[in-house]
Amino acid sequence: MSEDGTDGQRGRGRRITAADVARVAGVSRVAVSRSFTPGASVSDAVRDRVIATARTLGYRPNAFARQLNRDRSELVAFVAGFIDNYYYAVFFDRLLNELQTRGWRTLYVHVGAGGDAVEALAQASEYPVACTIVAAGSLDVDAIAAVRAMGPVILAGPASALPDADAVSSDGGRGMALVVDHLVGRGRRRLACISGPASLASARERADAFGTALAGHGLAPAGIVHTDFTEPGGVDGMRRLLEGPAPPDAVVCGNDAIAFGVLNLLRAETALAVPRDIAVTGFDDTAPAAWPLIGLTTVASPLDRRIAAICDLLDRRVADPSAPAQRIRIEPHLVVRATS
C-alpha cells in the first residue's frame, strides 16, 4: 500500500472515492458524507480530519450522488437537436454560463439528425433533473413531447408543441412583419421566403408570418421554400427559387445561416447583384451578419434578454411547480445593413 493508503492506485486513472477517504482518515463512510454536507451532524475534529485527508488524496464529492440525497436537485437538462449554426452556438454558450453563475449544474442532451430522440430523452430522464430547457426551434413535435418524461419543461422557442409549458421566444410574427414592411417600402414586390424544415415549429411560424405580412400589403409570395437552417440549406433554397420563371427581387430568410448560403450562391454563381437586383435578409442578428464583407440586414432579438427570462422562469418553476405556465415573447427589432 502507498503512503496515501490507496493501494498505489492514485494517479493511474482510478477515481478516489469516499471509501478511500474513510479508510485513510480512520472514519466511517457516513462520516465522510456528513463532513461534506453543510449542517450535517459531525464533530469539528472529524470534519477537519476528513477534509484534510480528502485534500491530500485529491478527492472531490460525487455531485450526482449528492443530488440523490437532497430535497432539491441542482441539475438542469438542456435538450437540443441540430446546433450547427451561429445562433445556437452563442445561445448555448451564454445560457450555460448564466446557469452556472446562478448555481445550477447542467446536463446536455443532444438529439442529432437521424437520432432516436425518444431513446436519448429516456436515458436523460434517469438523472434527477429539476427542470429541462428545450431548444424548441431545433426539435420536431414528437421529440419535444417526449421531454415530458423528464418533469418540468421550459421551451426556448415556439410554445405550440407544449401548450401548458413555460416558454420564452422571439416574436417571429413581428420580426417578419418588420422585414416585409422594410422591403416593400424599398420598392420590392416579388418577395420570396426560405425558411427551415417544415417539421419544425419555428420554421413554420416564420414562413406563415411572412405570408401574412405580405398579404397585408396586397401581395402574394413569389415563393416559399423549406430547407435546413444552415448555409447549405440556403444554397439549396436559393437554387430552387432560381428554377422559377423569374427570380424574386427580395429573399426573406428564416435565419442568418440560410441568408449566408443565399449570398454565397448569388455572388459565386449568378450575375444578380445584391441589393440592386435582389435584396436578402436574415433573422437572429448573429455576429457574422455585421461583418463588413456580409453586411446582412436582419432581425435582432436580444439574446441576453431571452436568457435572463429563461433563467428567471427556471427559478420560479422550481420554487413553485404548480404555478401557471408563462409565455414570454421578446420584442425584436430590424437591423438594416447593405444587403437591402
Image (tube, rainbow, N blue to C red):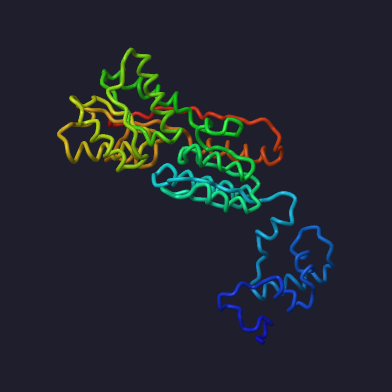
Return the residue found at the far top. Answer: 218
Q: Position of residue 53 (x, y in %)?
A: 71, 75
User: Which residue does the image show at 29% across and 23% down from the upper left?
Assistant: 191
Q: Is residue 4 above or below residue 123?
A: below
Q: How many marks?
A: 0
Q: Position of residue 57 (x, y in %)?
A: 66, 75
Residue 267 at x, y percent in the picture: 20, 38
Residue furthest to the left? 271
The quadrant of the picture occupied by the C terminus is top left
In this view of the protein, which residue sits in the foreground, 19 or 36? Answer: 19
To which quarter of the image does residue 258 belong?
Answer: top left
The residue closer to the viewer here, 159 or 312, is 159
Q: Give the left or right position of residue 245, taking residue 292 as reference.
A: left
* Residue 143 coordinates in the image, percent (x, y): 51, 42
Q: In this view of the protein, which residue sits in the foreground, 197 or 60?
A: 197
Residue 47, by quadrant, is: bottom right
75 up-or-down from 189: above or below:
below
At x 46%, y 33%, the residue is: 201
Left or right of 237 on screen, residue 268: left
Q: Quadrant of the N terminus?
A: bottom right
Q: Is residue 296 left or right of residue 333?
A: left
